[in-house]
Image (cartoon, rainbow, N blue to C red):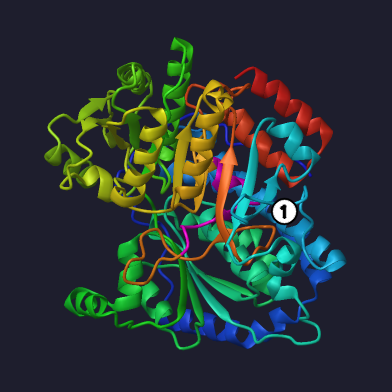
Amino acid sequence: MNTPAIPTDSAAPPRSHEATGTLPPTPAEAIDAAVRELAERKDAWVAVHIEDRVTLLERLRKDAWAASAQLVADAVKVKGIRPGSSHEADEWSAGPYPLLRNLRLLQRSLAETRRYGAPRLPTRPWTRPDGQVVARVFPTDTWDKLLLRGYSAEVWMDHDVHLDTLADTQAIAYRDKEKRPHPGKVALVLQAGNVSSIGPMDALYKLFVEDQVVVLKTNPVNDYVGRFVERAFAALIDAGFLRVVYGGVEAGAQLSAHPLVDEIHITGSDRTHDAIVFGTGEEGRANKAAGVLKNTRRLTSELGNVTPVIVVPGPWSAKDVRRQATNIVSGLTNNAGFNCIAHRVIVQHADWALRQDLVDAVRARLVATPTRTAYYPGAAKRFAVYADAHAQLERYGDPAEGDLPWGLVPDVDPTDSSSPCFDTEAFCGLFAETALPAADPAAYLREAVRFVNEEVWGTLACVLIVHPDTLADAAMAHAVDDAIAALRYGTVVVNHFPGIAYALGSTPWGAAPGHTPTDIQSGRGVVHNTYLFSHPHKAVVRGPFRPLPKPPWWVGNAQALALGQQLAAFEAAPSFGRIARLAWTALKG
């Protein structure tokens, strides 16, 4: 496959801080027709043989790669990014790259399911001391070992999964389907407005993992993704298994209540979830209070998070402090702060000698990081909420028109129940820092787990930053393992931005299990999950404290754009030549 042309126009696009959609909404009668067409084809999709699905996924990967450059160009224009700048890297790394990887891994998993009955795990699974089954899912193959040395990922299963029957919990939709086919379903996927790969990947999950045809409704903030899907997934659309519709609240309401829609998946906010499930206004509030569901369809969701970064005290050098400040700031500034797993609360030990050094290094990194267009609607208002609540909010950068400064709220009282820093997702370029008193690092770690579990909103993802010498101490290694087990999050990432777990594809992506409609927090169910587990409990991703080369998502990586483009090209068609080019580019970053 040839590399698609990369836009070379260096002129800065017009800045806009309130993107409202560029494509006309789909008329109500056309939306109804789209759902009816899907309903007529839902059983035909179930009947598509798994070998034909493998072939189809290969076609989708080629077509998605061919359309990738235009997707990035559209995103760059809408988000106020200068083409060719390092910020364009975000659009490659969070758009084509994870989508192409998802397609590649799904293709392999279905091929293995056809041959073995379930996807093959890269290593033999094992059990933790409490009997919980764990499966290693990254590195998935030799390519991964070459690309991300030192990184690993596991899936911890629900406690009712047994080691000898783990394979029986994989690829459920494909088990005995030829003998006892299940009825087809129509799924509604409501696309998020911030990251271009979310909607397409959510649609793939419904289609290839849960065996449902899909109507994908775009978000007005990034409705250009719909045009990409129409090009990249044309094979699915032409066969009647996928439809794309455009519009805002009205289109979403029509689809959510459509009698032929069987299931719904949403990536968005808990407020949107509640509006669908309970209704709006006073009626919705009353229904939620009474636990009365207005919409009883199965609804899965990923609804954001106030992502905590738990800093474990250790023997950090001055260089370590600066390095981790870059790591922490990178998790905030990626995509201008408009990520559901952006770093939001830095949690530290109040008595750690380097606490203030780390805060000062974070400040220095924010000063050196250019501000970005606040393209997501309402960002300025959300920023103002924190400014009103905290006089100590610090602003960094020299924002141009349409930008917002980076914001840091230091030294927030962890007992301050009125602070929005712990219970409200900022969804802009702002985060907070707080500190917890404790007698020693192990006691601090236990208190930090209690704090983020009980006081910080959401259960999607959490970060632990741990020095390798800390892990070399047996007592602290045990404390860290206990912390990972006790954290009530769908994903726990050691030493890195949770965006890496989103992009891996082999890990499930979703909230901690157990939420109810009246306390939905970060949502229910999972997506991605290319090993097709039906009972995942949490994902655990580990990476090096001192990564070498510098990760492409870290601010200040001079090769970020080239790496993003090359990673996408690699996932479109892996080769040793592309591995070599990636390695050479990474070393220059």
Q: Residue furthest right?
A: 115
Region of the chain picked out in magenta, as a range: 500-513
Check disc 1 and give the amino acid type: Leu
Residue name at image x 40 percent, y 66 percent: 515
Residue name at image x 36 percent, y 53 percent: 458
Residue name at image x 28 percent, y 29 percent: 400
Quarter of the figure that contains the N terminus: top right
- Left or right: residue 443 versus residue 432 is right
Query: What x and y, as percent, mark residue 320?
Result: 48, 16
Mark 1 Cα-neighbour bin, 10 Å: few <14, some 14–19, many ≥20: many
* Residue under numbered circle 1: 105
Q: Is residue 69 among the parts visible in the rendering?
A: yes
Q: Is residue 345 magenta?
A: no
Residue 233, compared with residue 71, is above or below; it is below
- Left or right: residue 31 versus residue 527 is left
Element under disc 1:
helix
- Left or right: residue 280 versus residue 301 is left
Quarter of the figure that contains the C terminus: top right
Query: What x and y, as percent, mark residue 562?
Result: 62, 29
Query: What x and y, as percent, mark residue 389?
Result: 13, 41
Residue name at image x 73 percent, y 69 percent: 168
Query: What x and y, as percent, mark residue 525?
Result: 51, 65
Residue 50, compared with residue 364, is above or below; it is below
